[in-house]
Amino acid sequence: MLPETGEIVRKRRALGLTQHQLARLAGVSQSLIAKLEARKIDPSYSKTKAIFNALDLLERKTETHAREILNETVLGVQKNALVSEAVRVMTDYGFSQLPVFDGNHPVGSISEKTVLSQVLAGKELEKISSLSVEEIMEEGFPQIGEDAPMALVSGLLQIYPAVLIVSKGKVLGIATKADLLKILHK
């Protein structure tokens, strides 16, 4: 089912298109676009579909994708590393969370919150430091493709501290809330 024809003018203006440009992209006449927007005609389904297809294609082209904000340097720890090493990496690099790997495959995550919850549970610091990351790690970060739209990335980052960007099972990069904020000042 197609959206209301009233959406055409809103989408066209949001994309910064003239009626003539949209008409050329959709393979229809400029006068058809003008009449549609003025609600002077009730167009055929095929013409309306062609217009919406052109608008959707342009929206997808202008949309920001995960690959545009990913940080290609993915620092993480192996699942058999000691918690003390994970804490050192987080403090040395100023990260509050890290992915946990088994070889090249992400299997979990560890964060300041994860470690601090162990402290709050009354465990001794020396004992926590000597645990393997695997013993206290949490679920892994969500994994998405590099073509994932920014809406998906930002939605996931409202729930998770980071998102891994993957292609064919290989981690290409990581995105955090800080990476998302960087695109605002480009």
Image (cartoon, rainbow, N blue to C red):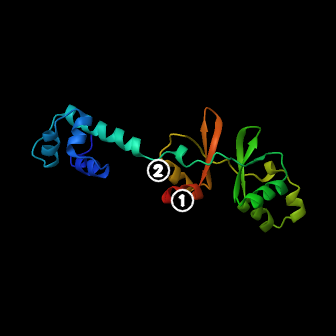
Q: In the rendered view, would you say 27 is above or below 173?
A: above
Depth order, front residue of 40/130? 40
Residue shown at the point (59%, 58%) measured from the top left:
178
Name the element at disc 2.
helix
Residue 88 vertical position relative to residue 144 in the rendered view, above or below:
below
Which quarter of the picture shows residue 125?
bottom right
**Mark 1 vs 2: CB contact within 8 A:** no
Residue at horizontal 40%, vertical 42%?
A: 60
Q: Does residue 90 appear left or right of residue 31 in this picture?
A: right
Earlier-in-chain disc, 1 versus 2: 2
Residue 175 visible in the picture: yes
What residue does disc 2 label?
Answer: 151
Query: Residue 138 at x, y = what percent?
Result: 71, 52
Side of 19 where 168 appears, left or right: right
- Name the amino acid type tagged 1: Leu
Label 1, on which residue? 181
Q: Residue at x 53, y 46 (%)?
A: 68
**x and y percentages locating residue 77 in the rendered image:** 77, 48
What amino acid is at disc 2?
A: Ala
8 or 131: nearer the viewer: 8
